[in-house]
Image: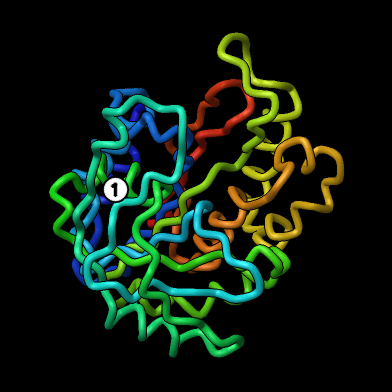
Amino acid sequence: MEDLSAITTALSNRQPTDPMPVLFVGHGSPMNAIQDTPFSVTWNVLGSYLPRPTAILCISAHWLTDGDTRVSVTDSPETTHDFSGFPYRLFDQRYPAPGAPELARQVMGLITTRQIVADDTWGLDHGAWSVLIRMFPAADIPVFQLSLDYRMPPQDHFQMARALSSLRDAGVLIVGSGNLVHNLWVMRSDGPPYDWAEEFDRKITAFIDRGEDDAVADFRSLGDLAKQAHPTWDHFLPVLYVLAQRRPTDTVRYFSTGFDLASISMRSLLLV
């Protein structure tokens, strides 16, 4: 596990009036929900230092919509096992957190650049619960999700997400769940990360460090490198929702900066 002292110190030094931190989590395999990996152990530690949110808004790579943006308004979202080929023990996992329908409807009012659709069918997909079950295992904090319209250009996602900023002042923890590099077609169980995977991760991190969030949103301008890192960009979009919350007083802190299966960056970040 990486040294989390800088992050835990920053969280410990927060004032009660400070805005809620914002998280991007490289979630990787759903097995992190039930196995003690370097990543899931880090999530455990981080969760114990995070301020208790009034609610959690998760933007997950695994809720894609086609032509609209939806927000979940269910009172009791079901735990969705949206994967296959894993041990039965993983399918037995439940994360029975309550929903946050009133906050969800507030989000519909905050975003004025497009109509947000209330959805009462979506539960918690594994991009959400596999992380939260390690960070907040009691499952007693209300959770709701916002979908990703895959037709919408990445830059538009970034601009729309800026409307969510006031949620931080209301104690809502905004969590983006995806991966900075995500290419399942070339995974391998041994060997170092691919050179192109490390290069893309390095370039995006440099953009973030320089505050060039517009360049992150324009990641497709990296051409073939971006296509290798993201044959589809569903797992990249959630980081845009996190960076859109950045304020001048925020510091970026990284954790879980390694790779899994050579082609999945687990790099995660906290704005605090």
For the N terminus, the quadrant is top left
Q: Secondary structure at mark 1?
A: helix
- Residue type at the position of mark 1: Leu
Is the image coloured rainbow, by chain, by secondary structure, or in one colour?
rainbow
Q: Position of residue 135 (x, y in %)?
A: 25, 44
Quadrant in which residue 263 is drawn: top right
Q: Which residue is mark 1?
A: 132
Question: From this viewpoint, is residue 41 visible?
Answer: no
Residue at 54% x, 56% y: name it. Answer: 238
**Vertical placement of residue 15 versus 210, above or below:** below
How many marks on residues? Answer: 1
Q: Position of residue 136 (x, y in %)?
A: 21, 48
Residue at 64% x, 20% y: name it. Answer: 193
* Extreme-top residue of the structure: 190
In the drawing, does residue 32 fall left or right of residue 267?
A: left
For the C terminus, the quadrant is bottom left
Q: Position of residue 148 (x, y in %)?
A: 56, 64
Quadrant in which residue 162 is drawn: bottom right
Residue at 69% x, 60% y: name it. Answer: 217
Q: Position of residue 61 (x, y in %)?
A: 53, 52
